[in-house]
Amino acid sequence: MDFDAVLFDFDGILVDTEWAIYEAWYRTFRDHGHELPLDVYTRCVGSDFDTWSPKTHLEDLTGRSFDWHQLDADRQVEIRADLENAGPMPGVVPLLEKLRAEGVAIAAVSSSTHHWVDGWLEKLRLASYFDTTVCRGDAPRIKPAPDLWLEALQRLDRQPDRCLAIEDSLNGVKSAKEAGLTVWAVPNRTTAGIDFSLADRVLPSLEALL
């Protein structure tokens, strides 16, 4: 692969966590008498609720306020139960092995927390492939701002025009493009309906890179 570094988003790229998160939110909405269409929910995928908030949306629909502390805790229990047997996305391990064999630098760049990302990488025995992981709190802003990507490039000592970002969300694609990276989108079942024309390339899966 003709890049000096490959920077992977985490959720939905390395592990299919996005669908479990969406389904948990979908159940929350249904429990309160409303639908949560996928094309509405995906506005916040890859970022946080400053971009678009399902919490604000549900309160607007119902005219009510909620105990989000408890609802968030319950939702996390559901998500972790749904993901109990989750493994890497198809193509992840052989692609990481290929990049490592070629001497390409590898980073994970995520708007999620280190607790979430590093925990999964350790659980799935993927952590050793990554030269660095850059997460929420490592830079002033998360995606769709470019800050996390720029922090990763600085840590890797690489120039953006020689590096590739692999993303599954529009917020992620926008942020990586703003950072000056080549961006390939790999949609999953949560983000398959998004228009990824902003990306330099759209692939059906990471297996296509093998």
Image (cartoon, grey):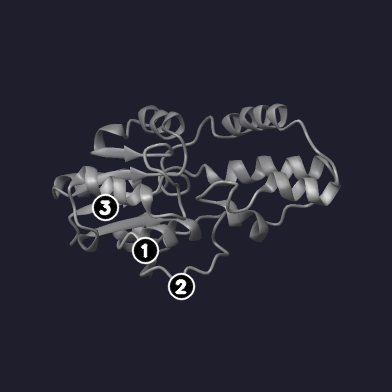
Q: CA distance from mark 2 to mark 1?
A: 12 Å
Residue receiving disc 2: 197
Name the mark on residue 6: 3
Residue receiving disc 1: 177
Which quarter of the picture shows residue 65?
top right
Q: Name which residue type carries label 3.
A: Val
Q: Would residue 97 be found to the left or right of residue 36 on screen?
A: left
Q: Secondary structure at mark 1?
A: helix
Q: Residue at x 78, y 35 (%)?
A: 66
Residue 6 is situated, as x and y percent measured from the top left of the image, at: 26, 52
Q: Name which residue type carries label 1.
A: Lys
Residue 76 is situated, as x and y percent measured from the top left of the image, at: 61, 30
Q: Quick one: quadrant of the C terminus?
A: bottom left
Of mark 3 and mark 1, the one earlier in the sequence is: 3
Q: Would residue 174 be found to the left or right of residue 24 on screen?
A: left
Q: Nearer the viewer, mark 2 or mark 1?
A: 1
Q: Name which residue type carries label 2.
A: Ser
Q: Nearer the viewer, mark 3 or mark 1?
A: 1
Q: Secondary structure at mark 3?
A: strand
Of mark 2 and mark 1, the one earlier in the sequence is: 1
Q: CA distance from mark 2 to mark 3?
A: 20 Å
Within-10-Å neighbours for mark 1: few <14, some 14–19, many 20+ = many
The answer to whether the residue labelled 3 contacts the one labelled 1, judged by CB atoms less than 8 Å apart, is no
Residue 58 is situated, as x and y percent measured from the top left of the image, at: 77, 47
